[in-house]
Amino acid sequence: MRFRRFLAILRARNKEFWRDRAALAWNLLFPIMIIGGFAVAFSGDGPDLYKVGIAATQAEQKLHFEETRYIQFIPVTDTSAAITKVERHQLDMLVEPSSQRFWINDTSPAGYLLERLLKGSDEGFQREVVTGAGVRYVDWLISGILAMNLMFSALFGVGFVIVRYRKNGMLKRIKATPVTAFEFIAAQVMSRLWLLLSVSVLVFVGTDLFLDFRMYGSYLDLLIVFILGAVCLISLGLLMAARLASEELAGGLLNAISWPMMFLSGVWFSLEGVNPWLQKLAQVLPLTHVIDGARAIMIDGAGLMDILPNLTVLVVMTAVFLAIGAYTFKWE
Amino acid sequence: MPPFLQVDNLARHYQGVKAVDGISFTIEKGRCFGLLGPNGAGKTTTVEMLEGINEPTCGSILYQGKLLGARFKDEAGIMFQTTALQDYITVRETLEMFQQMYPRTTPLSDLIESCSLAEFLDRDTRKLSGGQRQRLLLAIALVNDPQVVFLDEPTTGLDPQARRNFWELVQSIKKRGKTIVLTTHYMEEAYVLCDDIIIMDHGKIIAQGKPEELLANHFGDVVVQLPKMDFPANCTQLETLENGDVVEILSNDVNDTIHQLIELNVPLVGLRIRPRTLEDLFLALTGRELRV
């Protein structure tokens, strides 16, 4: 690898991007608009569906309370983790039938209502109170939106652009020079990575100024998650673009993988309580691991060791995508 | 000393179609070598194999006695038929980018002068005219101070004046001792620029040599042209060909032909005499017009 050749392509690609004002503005404004919009739309207590955790129980102990409509009952196995969720207002109530206890958060009006409902249906439960500030929907959403923006920008900014270069003969022109495929691809990845991180930092700082996000973890850890996530998603973009020469087909394929990720990776809503089959599917999507990792750092103050499984999955996926992408890559 | 470029029994097949079908030729150093033929004759496929862009199905290409390799990439300059340029960067930045890709480069000032780029050097590449764009693509092909320059249909789509300007640039490159490999379907272009040519059709070489020699070997005659309206409708004394509004008489002796025309009382005001061209040669070899 000759660094000079790599830099030549990197510089030209960066210039192309920064001078394309319309694309640049869109990359910055799109995530800010979404976060701003949701911050206004959900400035109350979030979606008005009550969530009640039911600690593992045997079938014959089913409560009358669980027949109440308009409440989402979520089976939980780890009681102490569920109590933390009550503290953060992620669960409105936790009920443990085996010990006849329930937990509510005294700063949440939902807890008061649910307590009355529970007492009206089942007798003999003991009240436990926790406190803690709620995690606003927007606190929860920010990592999802940043990661989603990362995904679209990585997939379309690398995948689509390489297909376009292949179709219009730009790749063939580069192939005729001493530049190697690796140098070319490395320059594309670095250019996009640098751009993605700059945009993400700007969006984060910009929206934090007026929304003041909950950020309990380390900024460096968050940056590491986003770097690993960006490289993984860019590699996926490269894999999709490895040999396609039709922009229409590339667009269709990129949409076919980005839309399921947008809905199943927990950008907008938590997958807790949905079909276990969907939850398993979400685990094979790289975006899920970026969002889970970032959210754990921001909301729970997790360290890198706590999210090691997510980071490992991202690194393994990156290696697989790059290996297949490099093996199948075609200049023409 | 081995030939500069030597091609032996070169072939390229695409899904059963023989785009190039076992051709052999050599290119000498410092000459302008032309590949001629109609669209689809196999010129571009051949030249892309010479450039190392396309792999041959069989046959060999030797550059100064060796297989094409990394050294050839450093020493070859290529101008493709169609090339997209990176958007949003200027002519100067484009040249600088390509300069950084090669170990040995032509100074920017030389490129600007030899390809007449000064007037639009700081213009975005998206805003160039057809002729300016071709000049930039030629400059990119020269950026590594190449030993051999490949020009694939460089003047297709240019207006006549831009085409002539481009020919002057190619002639000045030739004067500097560069070897040039040119494909074209303009026979006039080949005649003006090329020292040696091959004419291709359906993937095969149908004629090979220096343009003047090819014409001299195939034709001993010239063409006498007259407007069709001046020529008697049912004349049997002279053998004629009709070409649009013009009647053409193939003549081995122009004096004799003119005498015959005077005897037939044909007005000679619109008479013109032209030499045989490479287009006539293509027609004679294939029985078809060149531009199909």
Image (cartoon, coloured by chain):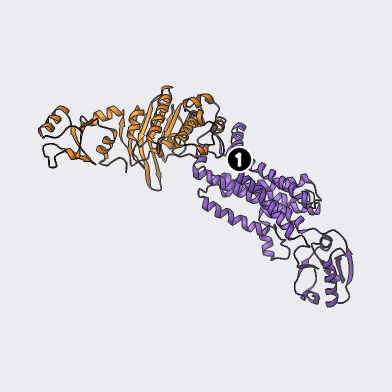
Chain colours: A purple, B orange
**Residue that appears at 15% across and 34% down:** B267
Image x and y of residue A318, in percent: 65, 47
Would you identify the image quadrant in which residue A185 lies? Answer: top right
In this rendering, position of residue A21 left or right of residue B12: right
The residue under label 1 is which amino acid type? Arg
**Residue that appears at 75% across and 56% down:** A138
In this rendering, position of residue B290 left or right of residue A78: left
Residue B227 makes an appearance in the image = yes
In this rendering, position of residue A327 left or right of residue B246: right
> What residue sits right under mark 1 in the picture?
A19
Residue A238 makes an appearance in the image = no
Image x and y of residue A292, in percent: 73, 54
The answer to whether residue B55 is above or below residue A34 is above
The answer to whether residue A114 is above or below residue B194 is below
Chain letter of mark 1 equals: A
**Residue that appears at 37% across and 40% down:** B42
Residue neighbourhood size for the residue with mark 1, other residues' Cα within 10 Å, grouped as few (<14), some (14–19), many (≥20): some
Q: Nearer the viewer, residue B273 or B265?
A: B265
Q: Count all numbered tags in the image, as a single digit.
A: 1
